Image (tube, coloured by chain):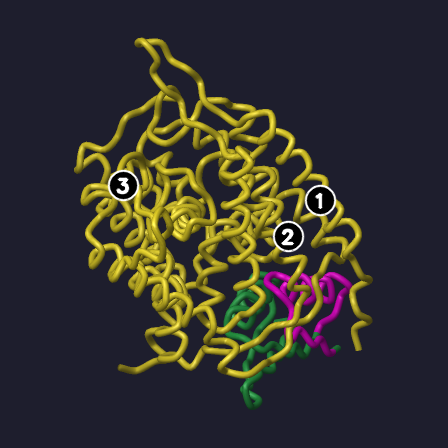
């Protein structure tokens, strides 16, 4: 296959719209075949489930090794190798990126979803997603101001190819743990939920296949939800946004066909209708994504093509997920108790975590600015 | 004018180039080290009325931006 024409098409406006639409069709199909409602793909939720499966947290309802995540990383690696795009690099403020990943996950788990899931929730009729997407936009807008004023985490450097292969190797390890599900000790991991969202999943082969496909096409198109908002606000560029809109419309259409649209705010699946915290959670997440240079999905893709700094962000998210559940920071969903709606949302700890996370991210954005290097 | 964006995270290559364009530069040479940055810089420069030619340089790309 000729590489150049394919790359050129995927980099074009039509290319990104097509790719957005493909993801928008695949995600609701995963729901049809077993993934939780409005959660065909959710990078934050799936990393949280993986943290649970490994025993990093013990929330029994959200433990499963989601094959989509290693699929994204390995799909990205495959595309990067085939299209000669694999570049092992690292060294741009890794600890800061870990902290940003941690904060991003706390924000996402207060909202209950990453930006991809926010779009899928909207496409399934969950109007709380509007609050989340508004918060995401506010967070991105705040981050843009720091970028405009010289925020940078510094340059990465090329490193050994083997260093760039660590995340793909870890992904293979996760798949082995999923396939063989070894019991490491009595009452020990690997944990698989027997009820709740963690117990709901499409067949492994299907999830892995979708993960690989999305990984490949997202690597080629640089698909990024946060980037789509940032580019509109910062450089008035609608390229990525057109893919995001295509994803949402395609997911909505697919949901309509599959009977998966339920419009409303209350008691939406794996969601809460606490508007303030839906918004604030995603403000934190959006800000952290901008400061780290990509949404959670994009960070997975980057880690597959050799970016060690993106890999550190992912590990920060994984750790953040473990803390979010061990320390009761993650929101609870809406619930019906005796036919009465009990609005979910974060605990007081979750609220404080968002506040502290915002302070941390603002400090990172404010203090890590340098004068733009003198142009020669 | 020459801008080296190697190793910078997205979207810093675009921002640095845009800042240079906004200072009134008519001709720019931008060094990028990945295709994402290359495409993003190219798209932004085109939208600002620049023609862009790309010259591979080992694993890097040199973008020549000229005001049309």
Nearer to the camera, A303 or A148: A303
Task: State the image quarter where residue A18 is shown.
Answer: bottom left
The disc numbered 2 marks a residue on which chain? A
Chain identifier matching the yellow colour in the rendered picture = A
**Is residue B12 located in the magenta-colored stretch of the structure?**
yes
How crowded is the residue under tag 2: few (<14 C-alpha within 10 Å), some, or many (20+)? many
Which of the numbered marks, if any, corresponds to residue A2?
A: none
The disc numbered 3 marks a residue on which chain? A
For the residues marked 2 and 3, what is the alpha-carbon distance in whole angstroms? 30 Å
For the residues marked 1 and 2, what is the alpha-carbon distance in whole angstroms? 9 Å
Residue linked to disc 1: A360
Query: What residue lies at 35% left-to-right and 74% top-to-bottom?
Result: A78
Mark 3 lies on a secondary structure that is helix
Query: Bounds of the magenta span?
Result: B2-26
Mark 1 lies on a secondary structure that is helix
Residue linked to disc 3: A199
- Image position of A118 with respect to B38: above or below: above
Query: What residue lies at 34% left-to-right and 66% top-to-bottom?
Result: A216
Q: Are marks 1 and 2 in contact (CB under 8 Å)?
A: yes
Horizontally, residue A119 falls left or right of residue A366, namely left
Residue linked to disc 2: A99
Residue found farthest to the bottom: B58
Residue found farthest to the front: A186
> Where residue A133 sits: x, y (%)?
49, 36
Q: Is residue A243 visible?
A: no
State which tag comes first along the sequence, 3 or 1: 3
Q: Could you tell me which quadrant the N terminus of chain A lies in?
A: bottom left
For the residues marked 3 and 1, what is the alpha-carbon distance in whole angstroms? 34 Å
């Amino acid at each position: 296959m000729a590489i150049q024409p394919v790359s050129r098409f995927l980099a074009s406006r039509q290319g990104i719209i097509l790719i957005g639409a493909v993801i928008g069709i695949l995600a609701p199909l995963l729901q049809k075949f077993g993934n939780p409602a409005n959660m065909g793909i959710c990078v934050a939720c799936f990393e949280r489930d993986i943290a649970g499966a490994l025993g990093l947290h013990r929330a029994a309802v959200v433990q499963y090794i989601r094959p989509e995540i290693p699929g994204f990383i390995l799909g990205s690696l495959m595309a990067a190798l085939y299209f000669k795009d694999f570049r092992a690099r690292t060294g741009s403020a890794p600890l800061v990126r870990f902290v940003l990943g941690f904060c991003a996950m706390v924000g996402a788990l207060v909202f209950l979803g990453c930006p991809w899931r926010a779009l899928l929730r909207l496409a399934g009729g969950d109007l709380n997603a509007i609050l989340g997407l508004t918060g995401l936009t506010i967070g991105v807008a705040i981050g843009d101001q720091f970028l405009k004023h010289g925020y940078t985490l510094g340059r990465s450097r090329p490193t050994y190819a083997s260093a760039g292969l660590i995340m793909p190797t870890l992904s293979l390890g996760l798949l082995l743990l999923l396939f063989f599900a070894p019991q490491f000790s009595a009452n020990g991991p690997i944990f698989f939920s027997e009820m709740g969202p963690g117990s709901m999943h499409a067949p492994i082969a299907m999830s892995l296949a979708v993960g690989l496909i999305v990984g490949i096409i997202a690597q080629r198109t640089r698909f990024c939800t946060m980037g789509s908002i940032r580019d509109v606000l910062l450089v008035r560029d609608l390229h990525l946004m057109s893919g995001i809109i295509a994803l949402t419309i395609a997911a909505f259409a697919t949901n309509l066909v599959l009977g998966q649209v339920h419009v409303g705010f209350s008691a939406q699946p794996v969601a809460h209708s606490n508007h303030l915290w839906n918004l604030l959670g995603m403000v934190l997440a959006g800000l952290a994504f901008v400061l780290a240079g990509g949404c959670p999905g994009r960070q997975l893709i980057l880690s597959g093509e050799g970016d060690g700094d993106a890999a550190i962000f992912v590990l920060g998210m994984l750790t953040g997920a473990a803390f979010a559940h061990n320390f009761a920071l993650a929101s609870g969903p809406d619930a019906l108790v005796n036919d009465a709606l009990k609005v979910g949302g974060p605990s007081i700890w979750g609220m404080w975590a968002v506040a502290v996370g915002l302070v941390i991210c603002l400090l990172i954005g404010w203090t890590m600015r340098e004068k733009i290097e003198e142009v020669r | 004018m020459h801008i080296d964006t190697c190793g910078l995270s997205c979207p810093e290559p675009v921002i640095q180039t845009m800042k240079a364009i906004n200072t009134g530069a008519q001709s720019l040479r931008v060094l990028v080290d990945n295709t994402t940055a290359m495409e993003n810089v190219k798209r932004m420069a085109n939208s600002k009325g620049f023609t862009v030619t790309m010259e591979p340089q080992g694993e890097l790309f040199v973008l020549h931006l000229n005001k049309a």
